Image: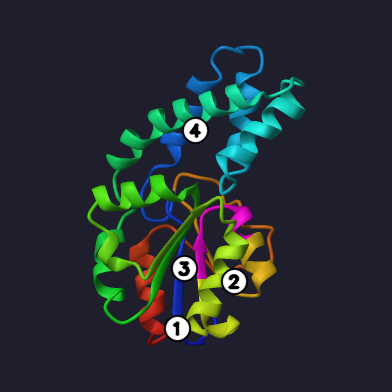
Amino acid sequence: MKPRQVSVLILDFDGVILESVGVKTEAFRKLFSFRPDHVDEIVDYHRRNTGVSRFDKFRHIYREILKEALSDEQFNLLSERYAGLVVEGVVHSPFVHGAQEFLGAFSRHLPIFVVSATPEEELHSIIRWRGLEGHFRGIYGAPTTKTDAIREIRERTGSAREETLFVGDAVNDLRAAKVCGVRFVGRRPPEDPDRFRTEDGVEAVVSDLEELSKILEGEAC
């Protein structure tokens, strides 16, 4: 990373704070098990679009993959069942290595915000269950887009673009950072391929938050 001070830190939730991405992948497989002819394609679409709201994914799946109309009733049923499948799994997901220590250390002197595609009410509940709410100055979830959330955080804090850092685990997170003109660090689990390898605008790719902590300490936040 370039030696510029970070004054505001924005973190994605799934895959950055908790190792919960797999929970949501399995939930999509179970949710669409009634369409075994398309379930692998649906799961692949979900994996390629982490960081996108589940609601947008449902609409895309029906429109582009199933080629069927999605009624309001079916949309609501999908949303309710998906939430039931994921919440307990996410609540009990392990922390990304170093996440607890990172939050405990950096939230004392650096404003930290969560920006996620998870519905905001659900996100608040999960964060409350994990006892993490005291670490964050703000929590943003769907239907607020990540782009709008980052803009609101900058307006709220008055932070300069070059001192605002977004940490995410998806290319869609990087796109939101680019639209807003803020800095970006990618998080990649050690066993996963580097999805940021061919992308520009990525200052660093870390395997966990212990590694991120070392980088930020070097920047003397």
Q: Within 10 Å of the Cα at label 4, are there few (<14), some (14-19), or many (20+) other Cα atoms?
A: some
Residue 191 in the image, given as x and y percentages of width and height:
45, 44
Is disc 4 in contact with disc 3, using a CB cutoff of under 8 Å? Answer: no
Q: CA distance from mark 2 to mark 1?
A: 15 Å
* Residue pictured at 38% horizontal, 87% vertical: 220
- Residue 23 visible in the displayed image: yes
Q: CA distance from mark 2 to mark 3?
A: 11 Å
SS label for mark 1:
loop
Q: Which residues are magenta?
A: 166-174
The picture quadrant where one finds residue 76 is top right
Q: Within 10 Å of the Cα at label 3, are there few (<14), some (14-19), or many (20+) other Cα atoms?
A: many
SS label for mark 4:
helix
The picture quadrant where one finds residue 70 is top right
* Residue pictured at 36% horizontal, 36% vertical: 87
Q: Which residue is mark 4?
A: 25
Residue 10 is marked as: 3
Front: mark 2 or 1:
2
**Does residue 78 appear to the left or right of 64 in the view shown?**
left
